[in-house]
Image (cartoon, rainbow, N blue to C red):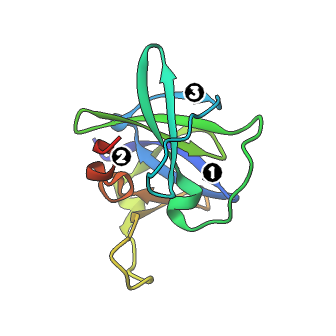
Amino acid sequence: MDYKEYVIFKLAKESYGIDIDFVENIEKYTNITRVPYTKKYIKGVINLRGNIIPVIDVRRRFGIIDKEPDKDSRIMIINLVDQKVGLLVDSSSEVLQISNDDIEIAPKVTGNDDDYIKDIGKYNGRIIMIVALEKLLEIEALEEL
């Protein structure tokens, strides 16, 4: 296979991708119950078909200005290291197959340890930032919930 499939989501009109192997499903926005004394980027938890799922506000995690959820907002359910986590994003509506030749390692431009973007994909003139899930999810913080 000389391509990978990515579920694409948007934040502030920018496109991001997550390897489809880690995406369980995509849910419409639902009420999120706030959990006190958690990190600021953890929005809270949802009850999804009897399972309590922590939800990360990806805008906050990336340091993007907050936005109230709307009809396009989605919660992407991710399964990484047997931990299910919801990612609150502005929208998510497509899966793209990006050739391995069109994926490059993301340049280190921020200079800090929180590099949430591991690769950059090019697709029909678009730039897709490929998310480093292990950095974004910070599994240890979620296990506290």
**Mark 2 surroundings: few (<14), some (14-19) or many (≥20) residues within 10 A:** few
Residue at x-position 24% and y-position 32%: 82
Decide which of 5, 139 is in the foreground and name it: 139
For marks 2 and 1, give the CA distance.
21 Å
Marks 2 and 3, the one that precedes in the sequence:
2
Decide which of 125, 95 is in the foreground and name it: 95
Label 2: which secondary element: strand
Q: Disc 3 residue type? A: Glu
In which quarter of the view is residue 80 placed?
Answer: top left
Which residue carries the number 2 mark? 3
Label 1: which secondary element: strand
**Mark 3 surroundings: few (<14), some (14-19) or many (≥20) residues within 10 A:** some
Count of residue discs = 3
For marks 1 and 3, give the CA distance.
15 Å
Q: Measured from the top left, where is residue 46 in percent x and y?
A: 51, 29
Which label lies toward us, 1 or 3? 3
Q: Disc 1 residue type? A: Lys
In which quarter of the view is residue 144 placed?
Answer: top left
Residue at x-position 38% and y-position 85%: 111
Q: Quadrant of the N terminus?
A: top left
Which residue carries the number 1 mark? 10
Which label lies toward us, 2 or 1? 1
Which residue carries the number 3 mark? 27
Q: Measured from the top left, where is residue 97 in percent x and y?
A: 45, 42
Residue at x-position 36% and y-position 60%: 101
Q: Disc 2 residue type? A: Tyr
Q: Measured from the top left, where is residue 115 in percent x and y?
A: 38, 70
For marks 2 and 3, give the CA distance.
26 Å
Decide which of 100, 58 is in the foreground and name it: 58
Label 3: which secondary element: strand
Q: Residue 32: give its label.
A: none
